[in-house]
Amino acid sequence: MFECKDVAEEASNYLDGDLPLGKRVGLFLHLVYCSCCRRYLQQLRQTITTVVVLRPQEQHQTDTQALAEKLRAISKTES
Ligand SMILES: [Zn+2]
């Protein structure tokens, strides 16, 4: 049976979908009666979502920098 410490250990695998079915079920059953771990997993999922959402923005920042570089070159030509 899953305990809270097991949930903490396997949480990231669980959210990644890397957990074998047997463990998934055990973890899920623990979540049914343990609101503490439910909250923990929810927070972890939010953190992961934030990281995933931030990645494209980092990419975008790089593009913006390249654009700023081009604009600077253009403005130099004009002045
Ligand atoms: Zn728990």
Image: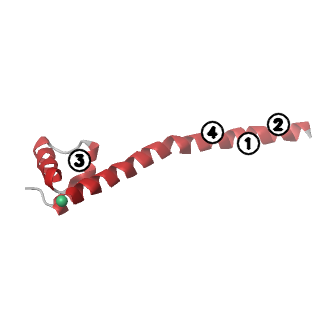
**Residue 77 picture location, percent across and down:** 88, 37
Tell me if mark 1 has few (under 14), some (14-19) or many (20+) residues whose alpha carbon lies within 10 angstroms of its own: few
Out of 12 and 47, give the one closest to the viewer. Answer: 47
Q: How is the image coloured?
A: secondary structure
Q: Report the Cα–Cα distance between label 2 and label 4.
A: 17 Å
Which amino acid is tagged 1? Glu
Q: Nearer the viewer, mark 3 or mark 1?
A: 3
Which amino acid is tagged 3? Tyr
Write down which quadrant ligand 1 falls in: bottom left
Residue, disc 2: 74
Q: Secondary structure at mark 2?
A: helix
Out of 73 and 40, give the one closest to the viewer. Answer: 40
Q: Secondary structure at mark 1?
A: helix
In this picture, is 29 found above or below 60? Answer: below
Q: Secondary structure at mark 3?
A: helix
Residue, disc 4: 63
**Residue 61 picture location, percent across and down:** 61, 44
Out of 55 and 79, give the one closest to the viewer. Answer: 55
Q: Residue furthest left?
A: 1
Q: Report the Cα–Cα distance between label 2 and label 3.
A: 51 Å
Q: Residue at x 13, y 60 (%)?
A: 3
Which amino acid is tagged 4? Asp
Tell me if mark 2 has few (under 14), some (14-19) or many (20+) residues whose alpha carbon lies within 10 angstroms of its own: few
Q: Secondary structure at mark 4?
A: helix
Q: Residue at x 11, y 56 (%)?
A: 2
Q: Earlier in the sequence, mark 1 or mark 2?
A: 1
Residue, disc 3: 14
Q: Earlier in the sequence, mark 2 or mark 4?
A: 4
Tell me if mark 4 has few (under 14), some (14-19) or many (20+) residues whose alpha carbon lies within 10 angstroms of its own: few
Which amino acid is tagged 2? Ile
Residue, disc 1: 69
In this picture, is 1 found above or below 69? Answer: below
